[in-house]
Image (cartoon, rainbow, N blue to C red):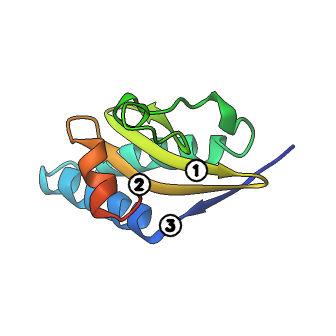
Amino acid sequence: MMYTVFLLEDAVKDIEAIYQYIRKSGNKAAARAMIKSIREACDSLSKNPERGHIPAELSQIGQFEYRQIITKKYRIVYQLAKPNIFIFGIIHGSRNIREVLRQRIMI
């Protein structure tokens, strides 16, 4: 079964911010490569969304509806709602995912 992947507004903003942050370092090619890697990871969820796991920070507080996959240093947080996948954010691994999602009114 193929799923349809939707990037929600916050996820789109995350991608734009990641691109701008890397680009500021003066390496436009690296910024493009990172975004390409993130987009490919997001798109790959259409074929096998159940491979992601529940983030530990969320399972500790009883939130089991969100999953994540990791690409490079980023956590792609999504919800599987067959036949759709909603990507809520692309969050740097050093950030507190529970706090980011709380700010986005998800938990």
User: Regarding mark 2 in the picture, which secondary structure is present there?
Assistant: strand
Q: Position of residue 56 (x, y in %)?
A: 38, 28
**Quadrant in which the C terminus appears:** bottom left
Which quarter of the picture shows residue 62?
Answer: top left
Which amino acid is tagged 1? Gln
Q: Is residue 30 visible?
A: no
Q: Position of residue 64 (x, y in %)?
A: 53, 39
Q: Is residue 62 above or below residue 25?
A: above
Question: Where is mark 3, residue-wise?
Answer: 8
Question: Where is mark 2, residue-wise?
Answer: 89
| Distance between mark 3 and mark 1 Cα atoms | 11 Å
The residue furthest bottom is 9
Which quarter of the picture shows residue 59?
Answer: top left
Give the residue drawn at x 41%, y 50%. Answer: 35
Q: Image check: 45 left or right of 31? A: right
Which quarter of the picture shows residue 84?
Answer: bottom right
Q: Tell which circle, 2 or 1, labels the residue nearer the N-terminal end.
A: 1
Question: Where is mark 1, residue-wise?
Answer: 79
Q: Tell which circle, 2 or 3, labels the residue nearer the N-terminal end.
A: 3
User: Regarding mark 1 in the picture, which secondary structure is present there?
Assistant: strand
Which amino acid is tagged 3? Leu
The residue furthest right is 1
Q: Nearer the viewer, residue 15 or 8?
A: 8
Q: Dot 2 surroundings within 10 Å: few (below 14), some, or many (20 or more)? A: many
Mark in the foreground, 3 or 1: 1
Q: Is residue 104 above or below residue 23?
A: below
Q: Image check: 65 left or right of 93? A: right
**Quadrant in which the N terminus appears:** top right
